[in-house]
Amino acid sequence: MATVLAIETSCDETAVSIVKNREVLSDIVATQIDIHRIYGGVVPEVASRQHLEGVNIAIDQALSQSGLQWSSIDAIAATCAPGLVGALLVGLMAAKTLALVHRKPFLGVHHLEGHIYASYLSDPTLEPPFLCLLVSGGHTSLIAVRECGHYDILGQTRDDAAGEAFDKVARLLKLGYPGGPEIDRLSNVGNPKAFPLPEGRISLPEGGFHPYDASFSGLKTAVLRLTQTLEATGEPLPVADIASSFQFTVAKALTKRAIKCALNEGLKTIAIGGGVAANSGLRSQLQAAASPHGIRVVFPPLKYCTDNAAMIACAAAEHFDLGHRSDLGLGARSRMPVSQVMDLYHSEISRSKLEPNPCPTTTLS
Ligand code: KG4
Ligand code: ZN
């Protein structure tokens, strides 16, 4: 299998990694969280500038940590969608430049496919088909992984992503940023049954509810109303109990849908990915619900749940081995369904593996 250097700059981590055979040879993540914390969320322009300052350093560190020379790298990859366009462009341009200078093939990678591939890093024997519960700051999806590059979105959120709900509720409870880890930490000391909260379901026109789609905006509003009611009593706010009840409800909603989907689709493995996959409540509820059905759950290590470049390199290596290559004219896109991943590639069967892609007439689209 190929050795790939990948760059990930879709949001607020400047990350570079080298992966070979689903084995991580180097993994550099320079997080910008401390900078964005001042603003309570990611400021896109600030993120782009930070990526510009950090990307070359991260590339050098990744190469030296791997102990490899450029000659041992088969291809260069970068996340190209979805994400903050200005931030994506920094990693994308750096990867294209490296590909040209070192005469290596270039591959653009879909960020969510990267999150799916994080599970291969924890279990290199994992093979499709399986179900991926992808829960990040921007996405909440149930994805049937058919084979590399072929994904069916079976369920998604109709409003807030799970991570977004964690961050908004944390802000409401005056906790730090990002909110997920703070709520997770507090949940361990709070009572998850203290406040029953609505799970949020999607009604179907023909009656009944959508089996897999989720909604978190109603839950967020319920936490807001609960907080206002409790604050009106003048008593100290039971922050840990609210956080724990919220986390319990999100984990229950996600677990129920994932198990139902896996059973209906006949999928015996659920892989979990994205920042919220680090959540202890979700991990334990999912494991407890899956075991009685004989469903295996693959949990990536915490460091590969949140954004990193190892998962991007892992996905790119698989595409590379299948002969997939991207054009250097490939642009950055803020939105793109994971079901369209194959639009990023053309087949390189006829060209030499080490031949660079033709230079584009336009550099950005
Ligand atoms: O995948 P990720 O690093 O970035 C995106 O692609 O969005 O996910 C970041 C999200 C944030 O919303 C953060 O609050 C959430 O993941 N998160 C968590 C935990 N750790 C990170 N949410 C719940 N529990 C956690 N332990
Ligand atoms: Zn992500």
Image (cartoon, rainbow, N blue to C red):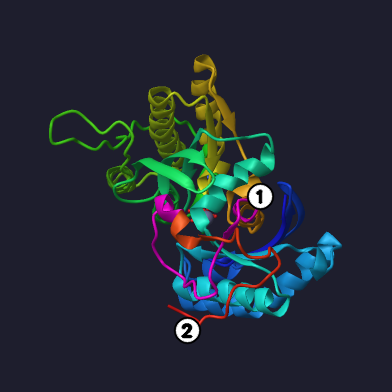
Left or right of 207 on screen, residue 20: right
Q: Residue at x 52, y 75 (%)?
A: 89
Percent position (x, y) of residue 354? Answer: 71, 67
Is-magenta flag for residue 324? yes
Task: Give the residues in magenta.
Answer: 319-341
Residue 303 has which mark? Answer: 1
Percent position (x, y) of residue 196? Answer: 34, 31
What's the residue type where badge 2 is placed?
Thr
The secondary structure type at the circle numbered 1 is: helix
What's the residue type where badge 1 is placed?
Lys
Q: Residue lying at the far right in this picture: please name it.
A: 67
- How far apart marks 1 and 2 lie (CA) works out to 37 Å
Answer with mark 1 or mark 2, whichever residue precedes in sequence: 1
Q: Residue at x 51, y 60 (%)?
A: 345
Percent position (x, y) of residue 68? Answer: 84, 63
Q: Residue at x 31, y 39 (%)?
A: 213
Within 10 angstroms of label 1, few (less than 14), some, or many (20 or more) residues? some
Residue 362 has which mark? Answer: 2
Main secondary-structure element of the magenta-colored stretch: loop
Left or right of 351 on screen, residue 255: left
Judging depth in this view, the residue of 160 and 166 nearest the camera is 160
Is residue 174 visible to us here? Answer: no
Percent position (x, y) of residue 270? Answer: 52, 32
In the depicted structure, whether residue 117 falls above or below residue 292:
below
